[in-house]
């Protein structure tokens, strides 16, 4: 497939609409949009943002549900010359405030029903302009209707001044300190990985890609980007909360690509056990975010009899690291494969030397897809980006442990930090611990991830109560849910008289983990 050269991420849409203006670009519930309609909307939004002062490199936050407006807003920001910052709609007030301040967002594109979270934050940020996509009649004086803002805006792209080295996106991810980090990706890095993904997934304009994953999650985001790059169709769902509804969409729309995380596949297999499922149109099934149990491979073939199954590994700092060619899934069912096209991976020991087959080392990544760094966080950037093979080059140190076999295939062994991956989301234990410590009656708290067949990892909390406390597990979960996204709320709460301590006085999380064995 020959695709016109794209120098900026938004060029992918502009090139596609020239070739396929009438093809269906997006299906979201009852909404169906052609590439021409998508481009017209994105251009009008770009002009509206320009009128509100958005210029080259300015950050625009998108705090919306998984809707067509959210998807198209990404391209509107890019066409305006801005940097898009997609924020999960489950994000609570304190984290939202941190991200908006840290990114120095100029405009917030949002949904009116999320005002409970963004309203108080916007009041503290007087320079932030708020555009709401719905409920125009219910807007307060400091909010503006997005629909009204687009009236009479041109449907042609504004003049472009950005170059490929400019930022395209800040993708916020939790860190071991509990403070979200803005991963900086340029147009160049995102276009590179986009081309690589399309190559090894063998996508083309005839595909229909399902997306039930949040667009704030880079795995969900790239379903959109790959669709518009190839001229394919994106079938966008808000979530996988109602599997039966998604199953109906899979069949009705003839979806050919099904991306998921282990949580989704577990739910899918449970439903299949109750009533057999079969989606013959699906040609590719992809998994990342957490390891897919090898036993799932055979069972998924019952549901997707014509599909290639891709096991993959990645992290936000470079989007994707490796993939297992589907032809190798029987021979190497536990592997996450080889480096994606155009990149290189190395498993090194503590002295920086390549490990022998079967030995454990730290995975390093080399390629144009590596992030520029963390926004406003040079120390954390230095922790992840190390001197490379050439002068001035930087390698991405994943701080994840891997082995490699004699054929060069990678096998994930574990993480060198304690970040929890649950339901495809990264969770900082410190962030959950901070909320626990704010609960009256809790004296000490510690959080770690424990293996879970549905979630990948579940959040396990250990708490020590004050003597007069009457807190119970249910009450603690309820109070956590008031301040945390649902996927961050502890699934398990264990009560202890004291937390074990290491020799230096810190909480000994290895000892806590041993208690569960």
Image: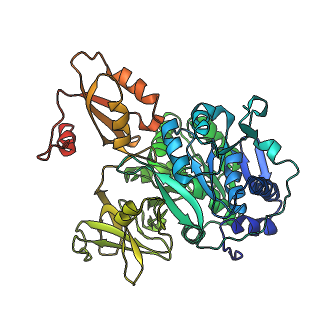
Quadrant assignment, res 409: bottom left
Task: Tell me if residue 361 comes above or below residue 277 in the rendering.
Answer: below
**Residue 88 figure quarter:** top right
State the residue at coordinates (56%, 42%). 277
Name which residue lies at 24% across and 65% down.
360
Work out whether 336 lies above or below 344. Answer: above
Outermost right residue: 152
Task: Return the residue found at the far left.
Answer: 503
Say how the picture is coloured. rainbow
Residue 480 at least partly seen: yes
Whole-percent x and y of residue 301?
Answer: 49, 52
Quarter in which the C terminus is drawn:
top left
Residue nearer the viewer, 315 or 124:
124
Question: Looking at the picture, does residue 496 appear above or below residue 455?
Answer: above
The residue located at (66%, 60%) in the rendering is 82
Closest to the observer, 40 or 161: 161
Q: Residue furthest front?
A: 126
Tell me how many marks there are. 0
Viewed as shown, does residue 333 lie left or right of 142?
left
Q: Where is residue 50 drawn, in percent x and y?
A: 75, 57
Left or right of 89 on screen, residue 362: left
Residue 281 visible from this viewpoint:
no
Residue lying at the far bottom in this picture: please name it.
391
Q: Residue at x 34, y 42 (%)?
A: 430
Residue 390 image point, x, y percent? 39, 84
């Amino acid at each position: 497939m020959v695709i016109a050269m794209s120098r900026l991420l938004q060029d992918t849409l502009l090139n596609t609409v020239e070739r396929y203006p009438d093809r269906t670009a997006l299906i979201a519930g009852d909404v169906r949009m052609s590439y021409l309609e998508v481009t017209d909307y994105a251009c009008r939004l770009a002009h509206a943002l320009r009128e509100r002062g958005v210029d080259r490199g300015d950050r625009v936050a998108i705090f919306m549900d998984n809707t067509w407006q959210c998807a198209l807003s990404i391209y509107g920001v890019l066409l305006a010359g801005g940097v898009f910052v997609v924020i999960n709609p489950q994000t609570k007030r304190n984290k939202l405030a941190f991200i908006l301040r840290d990114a120095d967002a100029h405009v917030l594109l949002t949904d009116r029903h999320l005002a409970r979270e963004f309203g108080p934050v916007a009041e503290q940020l007087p320079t932030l302009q708020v555009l709401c996509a719905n409920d125009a009649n219910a807007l307060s004086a400091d909010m503006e209707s997005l629909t009204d803002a687009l009236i009479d805006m041109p449907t042609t792209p504004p003049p472009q001044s950005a170059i490929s080295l400019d930022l395209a996106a800040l993708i916020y991810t939790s860190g071991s300190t509990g403070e979200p980090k803005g991963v900086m990706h340029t147009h160049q890095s995102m276009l590179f990985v986009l081309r690589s993904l399309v190559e090894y997934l063998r996508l083309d304009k005839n595909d229909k890609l399902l997306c039930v994953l949040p667009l704030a999650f880079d795995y969900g985001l790239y379903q959109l980007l790959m669709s518009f790059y190839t001229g394919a169709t994106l079938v966008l769902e808000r979530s996988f909360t109602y599997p039966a509804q998604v199953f109906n969409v899979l069949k009705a729309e003839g979806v050919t690509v099904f991306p998921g995380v282990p949580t989704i596949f577990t739910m899918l297999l449970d439903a299949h056990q109750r009533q057999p499922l079969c989606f013959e149109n699906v040609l590719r099934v992809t998994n990342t975010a957490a390891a897919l149990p090898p036993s799932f491979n055979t069972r998924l073939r019952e549901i997707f009899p014509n599909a290639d199954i891709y096991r993959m590994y990645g992290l936000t700092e470079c989007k994707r690291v490796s993939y297992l060619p589907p032809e190798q899934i029987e021979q190497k069912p536990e592997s996450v494969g080889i480096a994606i096209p155009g990149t290189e991976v190395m498993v090194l020991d503590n002295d920086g030397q390549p490990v022998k087959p079967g030995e454990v080392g730290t995975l390093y990544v080399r390629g144009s897809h590596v992030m520029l760094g963390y926004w406003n966080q040079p120390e954390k950037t230095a922790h992840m980006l190390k001197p490379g093979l050439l002068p001035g080059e930087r390698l991405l140190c994943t701080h994840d442990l891997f082995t490699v076999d004699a054929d060069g295939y990678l096998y994930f062994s574990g993480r060198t930090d304690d970040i929890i991956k649950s339901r495809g989301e990264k969770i900082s234990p410190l962030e959950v611990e901070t909320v626990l410590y704010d609960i009256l009656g809790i004296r000490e708290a510690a959080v770690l991830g424990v293996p879970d067949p549905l979630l990948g990892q579940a959040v396990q909390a250990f708490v020590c109560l004050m003597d007069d406390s009457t807190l119970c597990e249910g009450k603690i979960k309820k109070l956590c849910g008031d301040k945390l996204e649902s996927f961050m709320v502890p699934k398990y709460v264990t009560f202890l008289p004291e937390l074990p301590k290491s020799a230096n006085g810190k909480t000994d999380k290895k000892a806590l983990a041993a208690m569960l064995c």
